[in-house]
Image (spheres, rainbow, N blue to C red):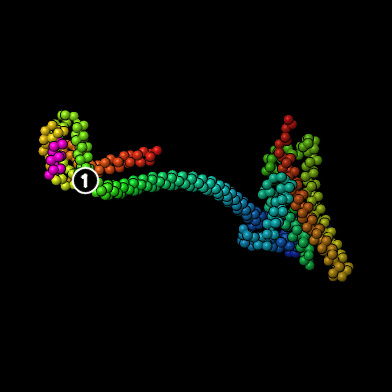
């Protein structure tokens, strides 16, 4: 049994290895984009069941963003919602036999965490300007600048580790149980893995929103005491 | 444990592309559709609110119209009552006037009938009196009666003043007698008249049985009625005046 901590390339394009996680990611992307394209062509004022489910998803994401930020959800909807959808689909890809979820390899959660780190900077600068964003590191006082900068890094790293650890452990446990017991024995663990995957997707998306909101709020001018 | 940087880059780019694609194909269209539905619902709610306001205004208008109808009905009833009362008063006044007119007419008719009856009765009474007087005269002594009437004629002429008798003597005189006068009777009359006039007078002699009895002297401007017919007429006139006074009382 190969270690889940190791990724072997499916093909090599010169010096560039194409990992299985990348291929699965492309498949997930194709599925999501194709479904979205089909749905977008059939949007009606009187919704179908699929459109109703899609609108429920969008409404829930908007509601979560509004609850966390207190601001209109439109600027964050695509990024946070896509993170949630992608991680959810990636986590649930473990249900397909022979498919290793992309989030069970280190590169994908690391890439997601890196994107969140960049998004924090992007939305922080867009919300309060570069000076405001940088000034946010000096709060509550300039002594905290190193700690705040370290915190911004460790937050993303913690998101990466949390997602990777949870998904990888689930896949690892199911693989071990599947290799030791009968065919149907891992099913309860797979159901649990479904729940874990949904929860991890939700946590990752919400934490992303929280961190982005924190960066935006820190970039705003401090209210003066009256 | 391996960590491939190429895969990290691929996955980062993959997710970024996915974010962009889903932003164009999923999140924005679906959110726009939700907003459109909310706008449509808001429009429907606004229209419903407007229609409700219109309905309430229409109800208020109907209520006002009903109130106006009730007031108009009351006013019409009041007018009808007033018209009916006025018409009743008018009819009563007209009926009263008509009744009074009928009463007056009936009264006048009754008075006329009574007068007619009375006149008729008087005529009949006169006729009866004349008849009775005629029959009584037939039983009386003719010459004596005529002598009496001649005496009364002379007395009447004597009661006139001298100038009046002179003027009368100059006129065309007519002596009317109830019976035929024979020559001696005519001579007696001429003599009596000559005595009272102071000279013989010329007169025409005419017989009129309607006088019943007596002698009357007529001139164009003078009449001396000296007969029972004249007496009966005077009596009847006196009785009529007496009855008129009684009716007036």
Which span is picked out in magenta? B183-193
- Residue furthest to the top in view is B162
Percent position (x, y) of residue B45?
61, 51
Q: Quadrant of residue B142?
A: top left
- Residue furthest to the bottom in view is A182
Q: Which SS class for mark 1?
A: helix
Please report the residue visible at 18 percent of the width from the left and 44 percent of the height from the top: B177
In the picture, which quadrant includes the C terminus of chain A? top right
Indicate the chain on which mark 1 is placed: B
Please report the residue visible at 78 percent of the width from the left and 38 percent of the height from the top: A145
Q: Nearer the viewer, residue B102 or B48?
A: B102
Q: Nearer the viewer, residue B174 or A168?
A: B174
In the picture, which quadrant includes the N terminus of chain A? bottom right
Percent position (x, y) of residue A52?
68, 59
- Residue furthest to the right in view is A180
| Residue B190 drawn in magenta | yes
User: Which SS type dominates the magenta stretch?
Assistant: helix
The residue beneath circle 1 is B142
Q: Nearer the viewer, residue A222 or B221?
A: B221
Is residue B116 visible in this depiction of the protein? no
Is residue A66 visible in this depiction of the protein? yes
Percent position (x, y) of residue B14?
70, 57
| Figure check: A77 above or below A193 | above
Percent position (x, y) of residue B91?
44, 47
Please report the residue visible at 73 percent of the width from the left and 47 percent of the height from the top: A67
């Amino acid at each position: 049994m190969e270690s889940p901590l190791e990724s072997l390339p499916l093909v090599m394009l010169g010096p560039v290895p194409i990992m299985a996680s990348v291929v699965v990611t492309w498949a997930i992307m194709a599925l999501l984009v194709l479904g979205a394209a089909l749905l977008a062509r059939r949007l009606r004022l009187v919704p179908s069941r699929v459109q109703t489910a899609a609108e429920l998803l969008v409404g829930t994401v908007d509601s979560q963003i509004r609850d966390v930020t207190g601001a209109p959800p439109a600027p964050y909807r695509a990024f946070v919602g896509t993170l949630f959808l992608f991680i959810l689909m990636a986590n649930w890809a473990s249900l397909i036999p022979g498919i290793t979820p992309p989030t069970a390899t280190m590169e994908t959660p690391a890439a997601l965490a890196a994107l969140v780190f960049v998004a924090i900077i992007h939305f922080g600068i867009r919300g309060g300007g570069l000076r405001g964003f940088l000034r946010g590191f000096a709060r509550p006082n300039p002594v905290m600048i190193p700690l705040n900068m370290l915190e911004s890094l460790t937050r993303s790293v913690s998101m990466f580790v949390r997602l990777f650890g949870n998904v990888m452990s689930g896949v690892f446990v199911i693989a071990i149980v599947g290799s030791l017991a009968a065919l149907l024995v891992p099913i309860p663990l797979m159901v649990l893995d479904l729940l874990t995957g949904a929860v991890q997707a939700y946590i990752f998306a919400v934490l992303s929103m929280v961190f982005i909101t924190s960066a935006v709020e820190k970039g705003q001018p401090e209210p003066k005491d009256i | 444990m391996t960590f491939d940087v190429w895969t990290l880059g691929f996955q980062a780019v993959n997710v970024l592309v996915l974010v962009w694609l889903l932003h164009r194909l999923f999140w924005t269209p679906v959110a726009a559709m939700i907003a459109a539905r909310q706008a449509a619902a808001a429009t429907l709610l606004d229209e419903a609110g407007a229609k409700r306001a219109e309905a309430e205004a229409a109800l208020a208008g109907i209520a006002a119209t009903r109130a106006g109808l009730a007031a108009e009905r009351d006013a019409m009833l009041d007018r009808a009552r007033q018209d009916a009362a006025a018409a009743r008063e008018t009819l009563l006044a007209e009926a009263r006037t008509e009744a009074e007119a009928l009463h007056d007419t009936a009264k006048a008719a009754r008075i006329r009938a009574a007068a007619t009856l009375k006149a008729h009765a008087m005529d009949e009474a006169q006729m009866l009196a004349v008849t009775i007087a005629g029959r009584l005269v037939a039983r009386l002594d003719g010459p004596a009666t005529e002598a009496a009437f001649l005496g009364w004629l002379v007395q009447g002429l004597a009661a006139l003043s001298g100038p009046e008798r002179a003027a009368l003597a100059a006129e065309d005189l007519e002596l009317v007698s109830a019976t035929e006068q024979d020559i001696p009777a005519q001579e007696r009359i001429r003599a009596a008249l000559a005595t009272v006039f102071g000279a013989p007078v010329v007169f025409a002699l005419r017989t009129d049985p309607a006088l019943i009895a007596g002698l009357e002297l007529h001139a164009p401007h003078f009449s001396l009625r000296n007969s029972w017919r004249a007496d009966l007429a005077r009596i009847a006139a006196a009785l009529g005046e007496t009855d008129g006074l009684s009716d007036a009382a």
